[in-house]
Image: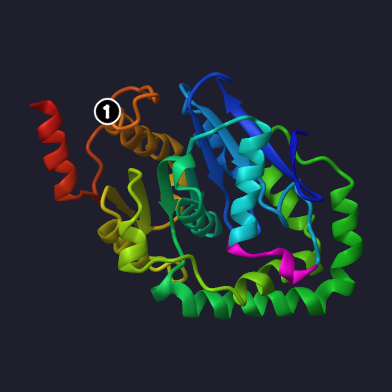
Amino acid sequence: MPFANNGNLKIHYTEWGKPGAPVVILLHGLMLSSPLFEPLATRLTEWRVIAVDLRGHGGSSRPRQRERYSWESLASDVVAVMDALKISKAVIGGLSLGANVTLEFAHRYPKRVAALIIEMPVLTTSEGPARAVFGWLANTLRHARPLLDRPTACIRKRAPSSRSSTLAVLHHIFAMDALASAALIDGLDVCSLPLHDVKALGAITAPTLVIGHRYDPIHHHDDAAILAKRIRNAELVSTATIADFRVLPDRYAETVSRFLRRHVGTLSALPSSVASAHHMEGFIKRPALRRAQRKRAS
């Protein structure tokens, strides 16, 4: 298993694609892990895709101290992987927890960002429900620890499935360290959300694909829409739920590939990916992007 060192923590990552190809780094959601992105990664055939297990997840170290978890420290896990692999710049993308880490990364390391993919961010509109749900989860994990320790320890001794990405993700969920998972939630709960005011988001210049889901009670669509509005070079794709792209991975890959192809002029080192993309219902492109495209065409 490949690891990068971040201080005394080991950060696990999974790779797909061509070693010399342009890099896309993907970050999972809370309690999930890097195999989540296998269906997408295996379809982005012209790219080197790296999915990172953020601390407290998957095959990475799982510290039990809540002070080891913050948006800054999670973003530093991504830096550790990039440095270990000698990657100076990449497309950074994430889902839910990973979306917020992606936003934090963009603020702290803008020169290392080629483009951003942000799906299901948790910002002002979603903050209340998310803190309530995940706070309850942290308390449940602490109280259930005596019942969970033995079975989860047994699961951790077994290797995750190499035949199914879904089974591998489930393995990592059931192999959790209850105290580490509770510490992760507690640590983020005392942190402010990544900056998302008009000034901070207006400072992001990287092309950004924002994905929101209209019927998600925890990841409110308004948060995605706000990001797409405030980031100057952003596009918004709206689907019904998180299941849309997981059930239809070809559509997911097409959406991501379409975004990357659209910005080949901006990201001169990044080639085209999957073959022709078709019109997608719910795709919203900002007028500024249309003007920029017409200007390049002329």
Left/right of residue 60 with respect to residue 19 in the rendered view: right
Q: Residue 255 placed where, x, y %?
A: 35, 39
The one of 71 and 170 positioned closer to us in this rendering? 71
Query: Magenta stretch?
Result: 65-71
Left/right of residue 126 with respect to residue 233 in the rendered view: right
Q: Which residue is mark 1?
A: 265
Quick one: quadrant of the N terminus? top right
Q: Is residue 35 magenta?
A: no
Residue for point 50% across, 21% down: 21
Q: Residue 51 occupies which quadrant of the picture?
A: top right
The one of 68 and 278 positioned closer to us in this rendering? 68
Figure disc tally: 1
Crowd tier of the residue under label 1, counting other residues whose Cα lies within 10 Å: few below 14, some 14–19, many 20 or above: few
| Name of the residue lying farthest toward the left | 298
Q: Residue 131 placed where, x, y %?
A: 55, 77
- Residue 80's place in the image compared with 154, above or below, is above
Q: Which amino acid type corresponds to the residue marked 1 in the rendered image?
A: Gly
Q: Residue 111 placed where, x, y %?
A: 45, 42
